[in-house]
Image (cartoon, helix red, strand yellow):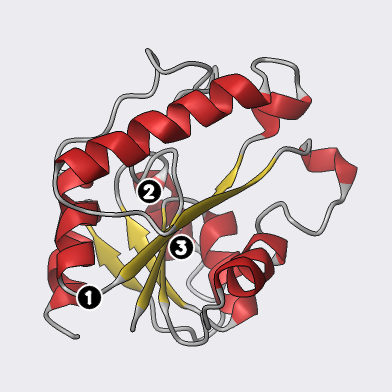
Amino acid sequence: MPVLVLDRDGVINHDSVDFIKSTDEFVPLPGSVLAIARAHHAGWKVVVATNQSGLGRGLFDEYALAQMHEKLITLVEDAGGEIEGIVFCPHLPETGCDCRKPRVGLLTEIESTFGLSLAGEPFVGDSLRDLEAAIAFGCRPVLVRTGKGRETEAKLLSEPNLLGTTDLSIFDDLAAAVESLCGQV
């Protein structure tokens, strides 16, 4: 069964420079919940890998994060879909942990926790660190233009060798990415 890895903020829900700290601030992007449900119905196992340094900054606690993730899971289930799991890095960027993207600890955790192989599977993100993690782990990088995606695309256009010779797919949003991916299954 194919696996679809998704970043959270900027891919599934609106992002904020002030961080997403509560269920009220967790607002799905248009079409993202239905896209996850569509992927599930097409046979994909959907997992989320997200950096959440707001925890390390003390902006919210693990209970608030769990409530945000429960909201996401419920919205997807109400749309007829399923999320296999959500993994997150709570650390600050300067901590140097192995789980914060662009490092690959979250992807390793997905494989070991859920018994999935991510080799060659798509990883949808909006930031350079998402794409770098995908490439480093052997996933297929997919960029969406939502969240920080347009900035990331502009950076890649100005520095074309930034990701090496990796084949990168770019879509306007998660719904467009899932539509394309579902046609490939």
Of the two numbered discs 2 and 1 on the same chain, state the one appearing first in sequence: 1
- The residue depicted at 23 percent of the width and 64 percent of the height is 40
Q: Is residue 184 above or below residue 134?
A: below
43 to the left or right of 103: left
Looking at numbered disc 3 in the image, what kind of residue is underneath it? Leu
Question: Marks 3 and 2: CB-CB under 8 Å?
Answer: no
89 to the left or right of 77: right
- The residue depicted at 52 percent of the width and 78 percent of the height is 116
Q: Which residue is mark 2?
A: 149
Observer-nearest of 146 and 87 = 87
Task: Bin the neighbour count of mark 1 within 10 Å (Cα to Cα): few under 14, some 14-19, many 20 and up.
Answer: some
Q: Which residue is mark 1?
A: 43
Of the two numbered discs 3 and 1 on the same chain, state the one appearing first in sequence: 1
- The residue depicted at 33 percent of the width and 84 percent of the height is 1
Give the quadrant of the C terminus. Answer: bottom left
Q: Is residue 123 above or below residue 23?
A: below
Does residue 115 show up? Answer: yes
- The residue depicted at 64 percent of the width and 77 percent of the height is 136
Q: Is residue 136 above or below residue 96?
A: below
How many angstroms separate mark 2 from mark 1 (CA)? 26 Å
104 to the left or right of 152: right
How many angstroms separate mark 3 from mark 1 (CA)? 31 Å
Looking at numbered disc 1 in the image, what kind of residue is underneath it? Gly
